[in-house]
Amino acid sequence: MSGKSEPIPVEFGAVHPQARRIQLAIIAICLIGLLLAPHFFYPIFLMKLLCFALFASAFNLLLGYTGLLSFGHACFFGGAAYFTAHSVKVWGWPPEAGILLGVAGAAGLGLIMGAIAIRRQGIYFAMITLALAQMFFFFCLQAGFTHGEDGIQSVPRGRLFGLINLQDTTNMYYFVLAVFIIGLLIIWRFVNSPFGMILKSIRENEQRAISLGYSVSRYKLGAFVMSAALSGLAGGTKALVFQFATLTDVAWQMSGEVILMTLLGGIGTLAGPIFGAGLVVTLQNYLATSEFPVTIITGVVFMLCVLLFRRGVIGEFFASKLGKKLGFRAES
């Protein structure tokens, strides 16, 4: 074996120019729809959907593209919510600085947790992340700045860059939309970079990546920290939307919820987690007043999707003849 590492070959599906134009048209229609959505739907519901869609997309970066199943992502989502809420309310920081602190805090937690968890694989990795996340949950329960079970309430949204009043719901919606789009662009660039290609190769054949001289642990840790930071971006933004941060954001149920969203939509796709988050949030929102438990309905939907769509709804579409004709492809 030569001293210089060989590049791991990655196959790209050729996309017909017409299919590329169709893809761009679909993206343009989605963007226009998102811009017009607050005129037809409740803005708070839309902002919640965007926050959880970003959260699920960040989680998919780890599961779908690296092959690591984490049961502790609520730690980053809720931790960033606490950091952002405390800095904005108590320290009087502007909203953009509070969110950046949340992202930095989540990345720091991801670095610590990842350095410990990546030493193991499979179910052991998942259980370690769950155990560490539960430790952080109990820390939030006891820490003074989190206010225990009451949480941090009445968080002011403030003014973006000192100019835009985020107390206005419309302004807040477009700010959340901008954060969502920036987060997706970061994920897209990360996945399609040489770093992302190596992550996919590690997911497919880790031993081969090691034999070619790649430091697999470093790549896994990098993916873990990036996923944690983007989860923190979603959590910090969500804290400003609802103006509070509570233990619900760091509970293990939140980790299970984001796994459910990702699996419903389809892992290894950019659109899958967004669809899955939209489905779960919509069910929770519109069935909240129903006498029938929402969790049972969500469970039934999940079972049907598992039975009918093995790759998730969007994953099955991408794998279908129509999806392939349009140039889409799932990574798993």
Image (tube, grey):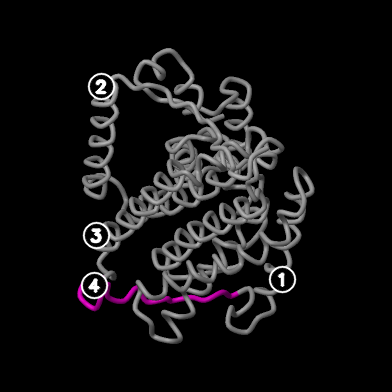
Query: Would residue 274 appear left or right of 217 to someone viewing this image?
Result: left
Q: Residue at x 65, y 60 (%)?
A: 251
The answer to the question of whether label 4 and label 1 lie on touching residues, with beta carbons closer than 8 A, is no
- Label 1, label 3: how far apart the Cα atoms are: 36 Å
* Residue at the top extreme of this rendering: 321
Task: State the residue position of label 1.
Answer: 138
Q: Does the magenta run of residues contain 160?
A: yes
Task: State the residue position of label 4.
Answer: 165
Q: Nearer the viewer, residue 120 or 265?
A: 120
Q: Which mark, residue 77?
A: none
Residue 41, x across and y down, in percent: 29, 46
- Label 4, label 1: how far apart the Cα atoms are: 35 Å
Query: Total label count?
Result: 4
Name the kind of residue labelled 4 in the image. Answer: Asn
Q: Mark 1 or mark 3: which comes first in sequence?
A: 1
Name the kind of residue labelled 2 in the image. Answer: Pro
**Crowding near the residue tagged with mark 2, few <14, some 14–19, many ≥20 C-alpha atoms within 10 Å:** few
Task: State the residue position of label 2.
Answer: 17
Query: Residue 122, located in which quarter of the rendered image?
Result: top right
Residue 163, x across and y down, in percent: 20, 75
Name the kind of residue labelled 1 in the image. Answer: Phe
Residue range of the region highlighted in magenta in the rendering: 150-165
**Crowding near the residue tagged with mark 4, few <14, some 14–19, many ≥20 C-alpha atoms within 10 Å:** some
Q: Residue at x 28, y 70 (%)?
A: 167
- Label 1, label 2: how far apart the Cα atoms are: 53 Å
- Label 2, label 4: how far apart the Cα atoms are: 43 Å
* Residue at the front extreme of this rendering: 2
**Relative to 96, residue 71 above or below:** above
Label 4: element kind: strand
